[in-house]
Image (cartoon, grey):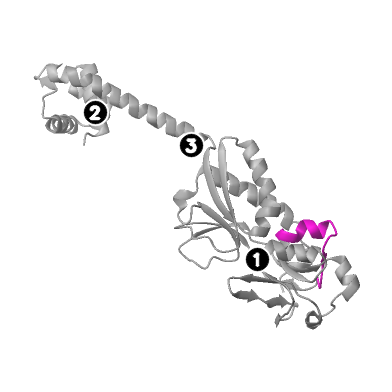
Amino acid sequence: MLRFDDLQLFVRAADLGSLSAAARVMDMSAAVASAALKRIEQQLGARLLARSTRSLRLTAEGEGFLEYARAALSNLDEGRRLLASGQDQVSGVLQLSAPSDFGRNLLLPWLDEFQREHPKLTVRLLLGDRIADLFRQPVDIALRYGEPEDSSLIALPIAAQNFRVLCAAPDYLVRHGEPRHLEQLAQHNCLLYMLGSRVHDHWSFHDSKREVSLTVTGDRFSDDADVVRRWALAGVGIAYKSWLDVSADVLAGRLRLILPELRCERAPLNLLCAHRAQLSKPINLLREMLVSRCAKLTAQFPERLISTP
């Protein structure tokens, strides 16, 4: 296979009429230039330049090959310019997976704005709470709560200071009373999330002195986290949700925090990818936007809920 720098040397030498002059322009020694010319002639099976101690001229074969060498170098330069311009633009297909709740209620409108800013970008969005297989599924990145179980994945923080909260609709609390102690959760309908066959009915808290965990019960289960949020909004029970997922509802008064003096479990949001090489310009720009938007939401999180115990 012909080498790019060998082709460059041949064309320069033909233009300058001197191999040593071409070597100086390309910042290489005369011996390296001579070896390069010999290598390309051996690969082509033809002598391209006739050399003497004082002159250099193209052979008939060299004159015929020079046109193709120039065209090859020109095409390579055009290809490099095309790649460079493409790297400056935000285009192509962005494939990502996101949790159902975060994806529907926060990410969708943010992606709309992101695509308005970058109209050449195509988005392929997969929503679901199961962990996407980044090595097999057609996604480049995944947004997920919690620390990744697969240590081979690259995890970049989006919202490290995100926590879970206990919340319910005001009308539910009017009808059933508001819990004043964790133990009173046993008297309430707790809305449960399930992943696969596992039901997340073990809720953990910190009361400024110690970790407290308890098992809760309820009459509704769903493997879609957004369904759990909708049940809470409908006033049928108490939910244990990520602040990012219910912040708009709490701030608007549609949901109310319960036992706000307790610190609940952390629920950091991370961007996961299989290789750092996948962190293209569109992905890095999207990550910057997500970090900024999530920071505004976590800044409205009640400070007492994240204080160090």
SS state under label 2: helix
- According to the image, label 3 marks what residue? 87
Residue at mark 1 to residue at mark 2: CA–CA distance: 57 Å
- According to the image, label 1 marks what residue? 267
- Range covered by the magenta-colored residues: 244-260
Q: In the rendered structure, which disc, 2 or 3, sits on the residue that comes first in sequence? A: 2
- Above or below, 40 relative to 67: below
Residue at mark 3 to residue at mark 1: CA–CA distance: 34 Å
The three-letter code of the residue at mark 2 reads Leu
**Residue at the location (55% across, 51% down)?**
96
SS state under label 3: helix
Q: Is residue 243 left or right of residue 38?
A: right
- According to the image, label 2 marks what residue? 7
Q: In the rendered structure, which disc, 3 or 1, sits on the residue that comes first in sequence? A: 3
For the image shown, how many numbered marks are present on the structure? 3
The three-letter code of the residue at mark 3 reads Gln
| Quarter of the figure with the N terminus | top left
- Above or below, 98 relative to 305: above
Residue at mark 2 to residue at mark 3: CA–CA distance: 27 Å
Q: Are marks 2 and 3 in contact (CB under 8 Å)?
A: no
